[in-house]
Image: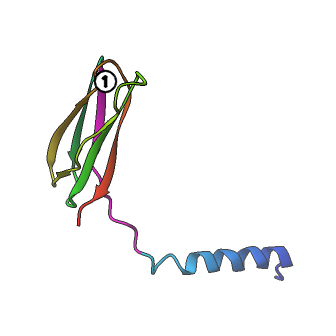
Amino acid sequence: MRLSRPTVTVLAVLALLGAGTESVAAPEPSGAGCRVRIVGSDAVATCHNPYPAVDRVALHVECAQWWDIDRDTKPRAVGPAETVRIAGRCWKDVRSAWVSHRQAG
């Protein structure tokens, strides 16, 4: 049986794509899962790290009023199987809040 030229090309591309996947190691999962809750002028983030690597988390709070100063907390280390609570606030209302992650070490 003779294969057509497009079929041979497709098979060659698939073989090349599959050849390099064995040597590349998949990254190990890491990073704490965080929930952010905003009530009026308070923002609270609760972060839990189920992985063995330490994760550093910081809460960023954007205030609704132009004259109210936005705030960023110091990064906190969240160890394996650890839960931390980070709080921030504005004088008036909070417009948005989010958590940033950075691997420790």
Residue 37: x percent and y percent? 29, 26
Q: Which residue is mark 1?
A: 38
Quarter of the image with the C terminus is bottom left
The residue at the point 26 percent across, 48 percent down is: 57
Instruction: Look at the image and tell me whether residue 91 can be seen.
Output: yes
Q: Residue furthest front?
A: 67
Picture quadrant of residue 29: bottom left
Q: Which stretch did the figure color magenta?
A: 25-39
| Drawn side of residue 59 relative to residue 23, left or right | left
Residue 29 forms part of the magenta stretch: yes
Counting from the top left corner in percent of width and height, residue 23 is at: 45, 81
Residue name at image x 39 percent, y 24 percent: 67
The answer, for residue 4, to whether it is visible in the render is no
Residue 16 position by quadrant: bottom right
Q: Secondary structure at mark 1?
A: strand
* Quadrant position of the N terminus in the picture: bottom right
Is residue 74 within the magenta segment?
no
- Across and down, in percent, residue 40 comes to 30, 17
What residue is drawn where x is 20% and y is 58%? Answer: 54
